[in-house]
Image (spheres, grey):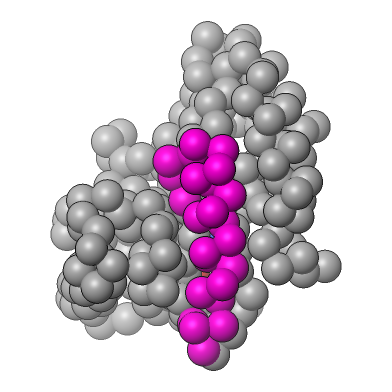
Amino acid sequence: MIMNEIAKNLKSVNEKIKAACDKAGRDFADVTLVAVSKTKPNEMLMEAYEEGVRDFGENHVQELVGKMNTLPTDIRWHMIGHLQTNKVKYIVGRVYMIHSVDTLKLAKEISKEAQKKGVTVPVTVEVNIAGEESKFGGTLSDGEELVKEVSKLPGIEVKGLMCVAPYTENPEDNRGYFKSLKAMADKLSLKELSMGMSGDYEVAVEEGATLVRVGSSIFGARNYN
Ligand SMILES: *Cc1c(COP(=O)(O)O)cnc(C)c1O
């Protein structure tokens, strides 16, 4: 990607978040843009950093830890991908938030590691909002139970809910899912809602997202080769 493309993209994404906030009567300051930098090289993250971005999202522990060890220490790292229990120890106490808590087993491991390190880990509980086979997290009703169980664990603080909505060409298709997640968060008195990606973050913000996870609209398409 050519120079300044990232700056331009960030400006555009932020303007769209602002417009969605205005439309919904929300405060722009209540929405955090998490720049999803998976597969992207440090130079690109630093371009975003120079533009003021401090929240970065990654989905693989090894890549996350590698970037964390190299890049500025004031970055807030968000673990947004499926997390295996045997990798928990590498990120507890180092990441700002774990978004993808999808089982009680995982939460217990985070709790155990947090106690060992004397820290509290902020998390969101992942809900499989559309009940897709390919996605992690419980359904809406399982999710509620999971929130209750996870909330009892020491060293872990449930801040809110997270979902990865279905891939769609039309973001309006996901509005209903975002509404459902918002309703569930309200019912459980949870503040944070991690929802919305490049394809649907404006709709997610209109429906109450406090953390939007945007990758390709900032850094360009990912190449997995
Ligand atoms: C990759 C990823 C994103 C960002 O996806 P884009 O469509 O590139 O914005 C958001 N959330 C999760 C969980 C991801 O894995």
Foreground residue among 211 and 182: 182
At x 82% / y 67%, what residue is drawn? 133
Instruction: Name, please, the residue furthest toward the right.
Output: 133
At x 77% / y 69%, what residue is drawn? 132
Q: Is residue 139 left or right of residue 52?
A: right
Overall secondary structure of the magenta section = helix
Q: Where is the N terminus found, in terms of image quarters?
A: bottom left
Foreground residue among 203 and 133: 203
Residue 103 percent across, percent down from the top left: 76, 40
The number of callouts visible is 0
In the picture shown, does residue 87 fall above or below 196?
above
Q: Where is the C terminus found, in terms of image quarters?
A: bottom right
Kindly tell me whether residue 14 is visible in this rendering: no
Q: Is residue 196 magenta?
A: no
Foreground residue among 11 and 185: 185
In the picture shown, does residue 170 fall above or below 204?
below
At x 23% / y 63%, what residue is drawn? 25
Foreground residue among 81 and 155: 155
Residue 7 percent across, percent down from the top left: 19, 71
Quarter of the image holding residue 16?
A: bottom left
Q: Is residue 136 left or right of residue 160?
A: right
State the extent of the magenta-drawn residues as a range: 170-193
